[in-house]
Image: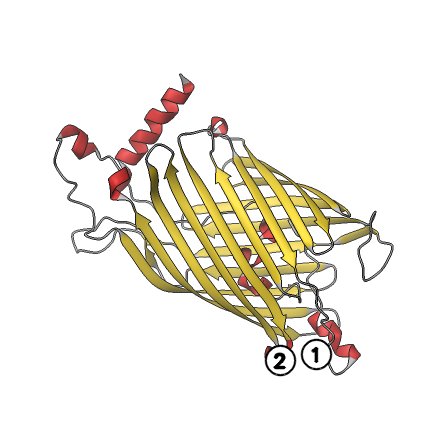
Amino acid sequence: MILCKQKIIFLLILMFLPLLKMFGQDVRYSQFYANPVYLNPAFTGSATCPRFSINFRDQYPAIPRNYVSFSGSYDQHIAPLHGGLGLVASTDITAAKDVGWVYRTFNAGLIYNFRVRISNNYNLHFALQGTYMTTALNRQNLTFASEMLYPGTPPELLAEYYKHSQFNAEFGWLAYSNYLYFGMAIHHLVPVPVSFIRDHNDKFKTKWEPKWTAHLGGKITIKQHRRHEYTFGDIFLHPNIVFISQGISNYLHEGFYFNFYPFTVGTWLRHNFHNVDALIVTCGLEYKQLRIGYSYDFNLTKLERTGGAHEVSLQFIIPCNPDKSNTKKKNSAKYSSVACPNF
């Protein structure tokens, strides 16, 4: 009975989707620092050595139509450029398990990150990202109210084409020391059409809203056997706050990671200004240059029967010698890694 009601509600949403005034929003991953370049382009090169990151998120798996998201990135610090270069790609798919995908987005971006040493303890990153963005609608997998009331009548409000493509830009900055890191990012500096319905002036009704991200975190060392190397039994605590605002959607994430090397566990609370949305539980394993993480979102709203969200991350860092390109040993601190968590 419950599943039947869910199907009916979702069907009504799809039926009246073209009549709603909605705002485009980016996917929000729960493992923020397992996907650092996606969170803030200023994290590009923050690991110093070449880094690969892959993330997968399955949201609302208990309902017939759910949301599946993928992202991948590559970044590294390049000393002659006084910064880092990065590549990031992501896709978000609104899927119907019985007929296939309904709506999807794809983004591919190139990032340049400039790094500045502002003191013996603090470094500052400035990043600029250029992105190619595509949104697509699969008309064949949609059913409209007009078609149900008047069979054979095509919908008149849809745009002639069901695909939008446009270049966009992002900007971010990051400041950090060995124990503290904070920054801000702005995504979608150029408004992107997200609706496939035109108004009376032949313009698309809604745009992909700019996304503002602010984050603050720290590293508390409880026990560490070797100063510049992680060994079994080292203990760290990473408290964090992440605020994300896009359009009319505003969410604050508060939580922490507890790292008993090589194991990590964490918990987060996600909420807006009116109610609590979800409790996020994370666990991860780190072995040398490999990091694997898993998280689950427990919905604390009326969507509790949707199955929450599963998320898996994989990160690999290629070993390198960051001091090799520096002519003086003292300059190696200029390219130190950000002490943020990996999940």
Residue at 58 percent of width and 55 percent of height: 53
Above/below status of 266 relative to 205: above
Residue at 68 percent of width and 53 percent of height: 290
Please, what is the three-letter code of the amino acid marked with disc 2?
Pro
Q: Which residue is mark 1?
A: 325
How many angstroms separate mark 2 from mark 1 (CA)?
8 Å
Above/below status of 221 relative to 169: above
The answer to whether one can see residue 273 in this image is no
Query: Label 2's element?
Result: helix
Which percent across, then down, holds residue 331?
74, 78
Query: Label 1's element?
Result: loop
Which percent across, then down, holds residue 42?
57, 64
Above/below status of 179 relative to 158: below
- Labels 2 & 1 near each other (Cβ < 8 A): yes
Please, what is the three-letter code of the amino acid marked with disc 1?
Ser
Q: Decide which of tag 2 and tag 1 comes sooner along the chain.
A: 2
- Circle on res. 80: 2
Which percent across, then down, holds residue 299?
53, 32
The answer to whether one can see residue 286 in this image is yes
Seen as rendered, the residue at the extreme bottom is 327
Q: Nearer the viewer, residue 70 or 1?
A: 70
Which percent across, then down, holds residue 321?
73, 71
Residue at 34 percent of width and 53 percent of height: 135
- Circle on res. 94: none
Q: Is residue 216 left or right of residue 22?
A: right
Q: Is residue 259 left or right of residue 73?
A: right
Q: Name the quadrant containing residue 114.
A: bottom right
Q: Nearer the viewer, residue 338 or 249?
A: 338
